[in-house]
């Protein structure tokens, strides 16, 4: 009786998963590609904000990418907020600004008693004046047209918040390539959820929102007790007040690039950090989708132990693995083509094995433990 019920639950989970992937593909395909209008001349003042903590190894690449943005300097402010770094981050920023005579670049040291990304962003918003707030991370680089994509979409569509793609690059190992494939899938999930208005997901490494919209929802008030969530939880607040005013830029040239985690420890801590804010999501759809994925992957892990009792479980595991693999393959093939990284599909099979292991284990850790280490801090 147990195996009959377990099989029924497993088959239901895999069928639900296929339906979810199909919905993502449908809405991704419905989302139009956004191109900068011909002859576009921006009118919007922009404040780019970067929260930096111990980023000495990567911050210069980010600054180099920002200084060559094809955006009028008289409309642009770039604020780098030093979140109590204890390495050379602050010196690198100051030297860069002085060397390049970059008057539109501003260095801000976060005051004592304040810490974290939300406090850093809020401090820069107070000091800046841009009509459009744009956030990215200190370890990101971007195309020179990056800001033109964001601002053209803002001016033409009157969005209150705009999400855009983030991708990994310069992968050096199979483990990093797995993360890259997984992250491409997350970008499709974010875009499809926004287009279908059933899921609010975005990434603060490539995000823009109207200053007035930020003020009208009282900024991070109400979500400031959660260390993470400067992106998705803010998006949730803005969407509640301004329905149908959230957009996504579907164009690979609008992406920001960052590096995958080189170690399993760093990867697990990152994913626990992301999972830790899931309890604050509003709407049943997000919870239902995440729970379905977690339960499916958990059941595949459980199958290994049940094989010791009943070898027939092998057939059930094979069915789930095959159907999940087919759905994931088709889904990720679409995304690797979008990012022009078709060669990444060579690593699909080992990535498929690793995916359900990490979802089941990290998902469980994220539910039962909100504690993680990030940027040298133990956070909840």
Image (cartoon, helix red, strand yellow):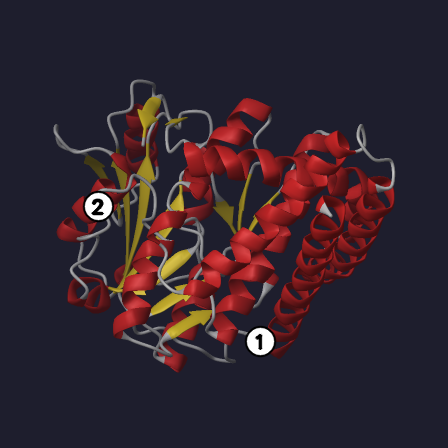
Q: Who is closer to the viewer here, 21 or 201?
A: 21
For label 2, the SS is loop
* Tag 2 residue: 224
Position in image of residue 333 (x %, y %)? 76, 58
Position in image of residue 321 (x %, y %)? 79, 47
Q: Residue at x 43, y 71 (%)?
A: 247
- Farthest residue to the front: give it: 1
Position of residue 129 relative to residue 104, above or below, is: below
For label 1, the SS is loop
Q: Residue at x 46, y 25 (%)?
A: 57
Mark 2 vs mark 1: give the one in front.
Answer: 2
* Quadrant that contains the C terminus: top left
Query: Is residue 379 found left or right of 302 in the rendered image?
Result: left
Q: Are marks 2 and 1 in contact (CB under 8 Å)?
A: no
Q: Residue at x 71, y 63 (%)?
A: 15
Mark 1: few/some/many CA within 10 Å (<14, 14-19, 20+): some
Earlier residue among tags 2 and 1: 1
Q: Quadrant of residue 354?
A: top right
Q: Residue at x 72, y 56 (%)?
A: 8
* Tag 1 residue: 31
């Amino acid at each position: 009786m147990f195996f009959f019920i377990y099989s029924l639950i497993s088959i239901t989970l895999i069928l639900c998963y296929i339906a979810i992937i199909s919905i993502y593909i449908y809405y991704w395909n419905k989302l139009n590609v956004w191109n900068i209008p011909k002859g576009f001349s921006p009118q919007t003042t922009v404040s780019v904000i970067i929260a930096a903590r111990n980023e000495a190894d990567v911050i210069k690449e980010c600054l180099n990418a920002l200084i060559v943005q094809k955006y009028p300097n008289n409309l642009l402010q770039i604020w780098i907020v030093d979140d109590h770094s204890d390495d050379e981050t602050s010196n690198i920023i100051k030297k860069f600004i002085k060397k390049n005579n970059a008057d539109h670049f501003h260095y801000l040291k976060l005051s004592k008693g304040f810490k974290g990304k939300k406090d850093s962003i809020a401090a820069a918003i107070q000091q800046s004046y841009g009509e459009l707030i744009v956030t990215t991370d200190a370890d990101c680089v971007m195309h020179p047209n990056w800001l033109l994509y964001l601002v053209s979409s803002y001016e033409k569509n009157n969005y209150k918040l705009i999400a855009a793609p983030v991708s990994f690059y310069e992968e050096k190992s199979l483990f990093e390539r797995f993360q890259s494939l997984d992250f491409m899938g997350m970008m499709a999930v974010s875009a499809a959820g926004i287009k279908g208005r059933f899921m609010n997901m975005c990434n603060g490494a490539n995000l823009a929102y109207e200053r007035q919209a930020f003020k009208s929802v009282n900024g991070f008030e109400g979500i400031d007790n959660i260390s993470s969530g400067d992106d998705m939880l803010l998006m949730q607040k803005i969407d509640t007040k301004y329905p149908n005013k959230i957009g996504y830029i579907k164009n690979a040239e609008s992406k920001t690039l960052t590096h995958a985690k080189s170690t399993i420890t760093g990867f697990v801590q990152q994913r626990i950090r992301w999972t830790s804010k899931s309890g604050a999501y509003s709407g049943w759809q997000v919870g239902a989708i995440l729970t379905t994925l977690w339960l499916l992957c958990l059941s595949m892990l459980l199958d290994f132990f049940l094989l010791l009792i009943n070898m027939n479980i092998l057939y059930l595991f094979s069915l789930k693995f095959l159907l999940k693999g087919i759905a994931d393959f088709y889904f990720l093939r679409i995304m690797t083509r979008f990012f022009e990284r078709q060669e990444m599909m060579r690593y699909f099979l080992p990535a498929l094995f690793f995916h359900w292991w990490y979802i089941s284990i990290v998902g469980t850790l994220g539910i039962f433990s909100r504690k993680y280490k990030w940027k040298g801090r133990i956070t909840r």
